[in-house]
Image: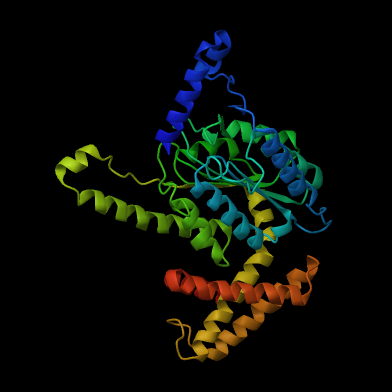
Amino acid sequence: MAKALALGLALLGAAFASGGAHAQRGNGDPLGGQFGVIEVALSPTEAARDVDLMAQALSKLPPQRPGVVDTYVISASFWSDPVFENEAKEAAAILGRRYDATDRTVVLSAGRGARLPRVYPSASPNNFNAAIGKLGQVMDPKEDLLVVFVTSHGGQDGAVALQEQGRSGGALRALHLRTSLQQAGIQTKLVIVSACFSGHFIMPFTNPDTVVLTAAAADKTSFGCEPSRDWTYFGDALFNHAMRGGESVLDAFHEAQGIITKWETGLHDNWLALSPAQRRSTPEPVPSNPQSAGGEKALAVVAAAESYGNAIACAGHLSFALDRAKTGRGFKGMTDIAALTAAVNAVQGRATTQGQARGRTPQDTGKAIASASATALQLFQAQAEYVTAHASSCMAP
């Protein structure tokens, strides 16, 4: 990740080296440390398409519901490799289910490469700030939650790279995001950053109103950003594994840390298996050490926001576990059909009650639980250990 960002910014700096004093501001940064990009304009057709996509994304957002902790989600891929768009798209879907925010989610993307049609509004600084600004207008800062997820390459100075199809280059830094959120009047937020060196986001967002999760420490790279992958290591562990269950977001983060440690240990074992000559020419994998910080006020709001989604996830996993037990293939330690039935009924009741408070009918909740159970079945083929663990944790009172 770091090499790609360094190359992109080096090319950007070289392109503007002739800009005289302007190009020297910010130690060679032509933007002078401000949030933005240097870009070649889209064609008229592409620009019109981008405006239409952005207008559609913002116009469909439903109003805030008084008395309910509404969650709004911005999920953005800032680099035009397929892995990042896929991660932003899939993370948005999982976050939407977790926080009952499917219709309150905006996905932005730097695309999947040159000459491929745009599916989502571009993850340009203007669109990103427009999404933040619009949500600031819609949300009630006293009771609602904003989730911001960004994925890209990252640099050693904490910059998250913005690069689209070789036509634009820039960076998002923690202070840029913090300033934009403040200007929009957004108070309570969950900030998730998947990039190398993303631990730089911890200190600027360590406050009572914020929960922040990062893929790596401030001095560490993260892994899995090859264009051919569906997820980065961090996104895969957090969203595709840990957040499928019914645990709190911090519990899911800690579970993801364990998964990442396992995968990175495998990477290091593979490096050790290389010949001495190969090891000398191949950087030794160093643990990414994902970081987290949670303000007390924000944690309470996040818990309220995710309670309905967590109840649905638990009901789905337990329903799947019950079905397995009835066929004589129950999970280890989860073969008592009477106990499983009682647990399913209890968590379904909790989900129904919480759903009604959110304006969801019992039928809506039932469909969501059935979908969660079907997802657990699909995941079981590749993630049996984690599906079983999630179901077991849902048995706890």
Q: Which residue is drawn at 43% across and 69% down?
A: 382
Give the quarter of the figure containing the C terminus.
bottom right
State which quarter of the image contains the N terminus.
top left
Residue 394 point in image, percent of width and height = 56, 73
- Residue found at the far left of this picture: 276
Taking the view exactly as shown, the residue that stands out farthest to the top is 20
Question: Percent position (x, y) of residue 24?
Answer: 53, 12
Viewer-proximal residue, 116 or 27?
116
Left or right of residue 265: residue 209: right
Q: In screen coordinates, is 378 left or right of 99?
A: left
Question: Which coloring applies here?
Answer: rainbow
Residue found at x 57% / y 91% = 338
Question: From this viewpoint, is residue 397 visible?
Answer: no
Tag count: 0
Residue 95 seen: yes
From the viewer's side, name the closer residue of 231 and 272.
231
Image coords of residue 65 (percent x, y): 82, 57
| Residue occupying the point 55% across, 61% down | 243
Tell me: 191 left or right of 53: left
For the point 54% across and 35% down, the residue is 163
